[in-house]
Image: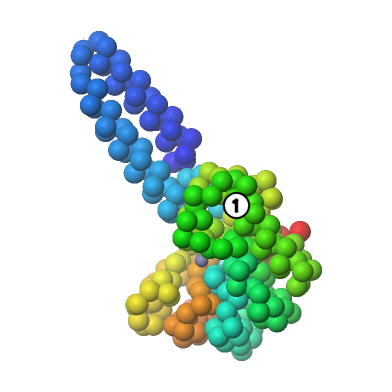
């Protein structure tokens, strides 16, 4: 199911109702039905990155080896990113950090540390604003370019991965990402580590979904993440899983 096939289906439904109206005189109020379904599918397709509605984001890898990747959104964060880095170093596990541009100022040394310790950095927009999804193609390009510029100034690398804020994709967002040559990265396991749920229930939710090729979404902006991360890595190791980088798992380039 894609935006295109949904739109074609909607148009066909309108034509059929129009024909039935002309031939058999059925009420045009039947148009409410396809319109409602169309709207519902658009809302679902935009909100769920795994639906691949507008784009083909990478949400997992099709592999049989027991390999998984870790990703952290919404940093850099003065309090939590260093703690996440220290656990990753302790376990020798690589990860990808999808950073918000406006969080970089004042946290340049943390960004440098992420890079120096062998982790990857991806783009997670500049503002991460609640209304970001109403932006135009140009608006999204500005979001991506501003963050890319800040990161380039600090680590001298041009990012190629983009994780949409809130996992919401819109046609304009996808368009901007394509024009700027970004790969859109989703996830297969959403931890909900920023919700009021307990560490125990978050860890359990993550663990029950782990399978070969999984991409786990965590946030280096929440105190629960630190414990969840530790428990997740322990569980993965105990069950024979190897934590690999996103680029190794997906066989894609992280930087230009
Ligand atoms: Zn985010």
Q: Nearer the viewer, residue 74 or 101?
A: 101
Q: Nearer the viewer, residue 61 or 83?
A: 83
109 lies above or below 178: below
Expressed as whole percent of the image width and height from the top left, the position of residue 31 reads 28, 28
Disc 1 is placed on an element classified as helix
Quadrant where the C terminus lies?
bottom right
Q: Residue at x 67, y 60 (%)?
A: 146
The colour mode here is rainbow
Whether residue 203 is visible here, answered yes or no, is yes
Q: Name the residue that disc number 1 marks.
A: 140
Q: Choose top left, top right, bottom left or bottom right for residue 92.
A: bottom right
Whether ligand 1 has any atom under 8 Å from the Cβ at mark 1 is answered as no
How many discs mark residues in the rendered view? Answer: 1
Q: Nearer the viewer, residue 97 or 74?
A: 74
Q: Residue at x 47, y 80 (%)?
A: 222
Whether residue 114 is visible here, answered yes or no, is no
Q: Residue at x 77, y 69 (%)?
A: 153
Q: Residue furthest right?
A: 156
25 lies above or below 3: above
Quadrant where the N terminus lies?
top left
Expressed as whole percent of the image width and height from the top left, the position of residue 74 reads 54, 71
Q: Nearer the viewer, residue 101 or 53?
A: 101
Q: Residue at x 50, y 73 (%)?
A: 218
Expressed as whole percent of the image width and height from the top left, the position of residue 69 reads 57, 70
256 lies above or below 88: above
Expressed as whole percent of the image width and height from the top left, the position of residue 161 reads 64, 60
Q: Is residue 154 left or right of residue 175?
A: right
Q: Residue furthest top?
A: 23
Mark 1: few/some/many CA within 10 Å (<14, 14-19, 20+): many
């Amino acid at each position: 199911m894609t935006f295109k096939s949904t739109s074609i289906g909607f148009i066909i439904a309108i034509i059929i109702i129009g024909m039935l109206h002309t031939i058999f005189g059925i009420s045009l109020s039947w148009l409410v039905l396809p319109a409602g379904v169309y709207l519902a599918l658009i809302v679902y397709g935009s909100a769920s990155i795994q639906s691949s509605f507008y784009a083909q984001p990478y949400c997992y890898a099709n592999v049989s080896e027991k390999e998984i990747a870790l990703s952290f959104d919404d940093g850099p964060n003065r309090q939590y990113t260093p703690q996440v880095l220290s656990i990753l170093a302790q376990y020798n596990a690589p990860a990808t950090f999808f950073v918000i541009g406006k969080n970089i100022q004042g946290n340049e040394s943390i960004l440098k540390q992420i890079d120096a310790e062998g982790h990857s950095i991806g783009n997670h927009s500049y503002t991460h604003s609640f209304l970001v999804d109403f932006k135009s193609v140009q608006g999204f390009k500005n979001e991506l370019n501003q963050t890319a510029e800040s990161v380039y100034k600090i680590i001298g690398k041009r990012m190629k991965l983009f994780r949409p804020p809130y996992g919401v994709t819109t046609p304009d967002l996808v368009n901007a990402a394509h024009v700027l040559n970004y790969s859109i990265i989703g996830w297969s396991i959403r931890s909900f580590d920023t919700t009021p749920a307990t560490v125990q229930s978050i860890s359990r939710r993550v663990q029950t979904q782990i399978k070969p090729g999984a991409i786990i979404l965590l946030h280096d902006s929440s105190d629960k993440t630190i414990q969840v991360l530790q428990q997740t890595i322990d569980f993965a190791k105990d069950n024979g899983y190897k934590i690999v980088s996103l680029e190794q798992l997906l066989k894609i380039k992280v930087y230009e």
